[in-house]
Image (tube, helix red, strand yellow):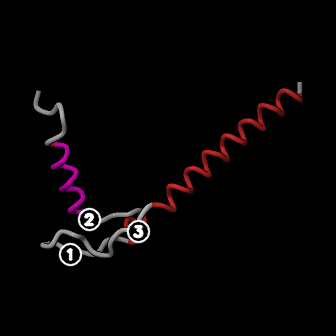
């Protein structure tokens, strides 16, 4: 039975490596965010951790944008 288990483990390892390779490719392609909020009336600095993930808005402006987007989401108000 070890041969069948080894084959299954090799398949799992290959799938995990493939998934990691695809993930790393998308992370590299993600553009770096801005150092300061793009809202002209704000211009607050953006934390480095959020900037590295591609953030273009400060935390407060992003929160407001998320609330605004949720209010106008399709199917809302039925």
Tell me the residue at 84%/26% (across/down): 4
The percent position of residue 17, horizontal first and vertical second, equals 67, 47
The percent position of residue 59, horizontal first and vertical second, equals 27, 63
- Residue 14 is left or right of residue 19, and the answer is right
Tell me the residue at 22%/63% (across/down): 60
Residue matched to label 3: 32
Residue matched to label 1: 43
Residue matched to label 2: 57
Q: Which residues are magenta?
A: 59-70
Q: In this rendering, which labeled residue sits more in front, label 3 or label 1?
A: 3
- Return the disc, 3 or 1, that comes first in the chain's sequence: 3
The percent position of residue 62, horizontal first and vertical second, equals 24, 59
The quadrant of the rendering that contains the N terminus is top right
Question: Distance from label 2 to label 3 (Cα)?
Answer: 12 Å
Closest to the observer, 28 or 52: 28
Q: Element under label 2? A: loop
- Return the disc, 2 or 3, that comes first in the chain's sequence: 3
Q: Residues within 10 Å of mark 3 (few under 14, many from 20)?
A: some
């Amino acid at each position: 039975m070890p041969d069948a288990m080894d084959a299954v483990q090799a398949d799992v390892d290959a799938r995990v490596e493939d998934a990691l390779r695809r993930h790393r490719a998308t992370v590299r392609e993600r553009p770096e965010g801005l150092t300061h909020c793009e809202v002209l009336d704000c211009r607050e600095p953006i934390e480095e951790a959020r900037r590295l993930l591609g953030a273009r808005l400060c935390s407060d402006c992003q929160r407001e944008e998320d609330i605004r987007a949720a209010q106008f989401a399709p199917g809302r108000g039925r």
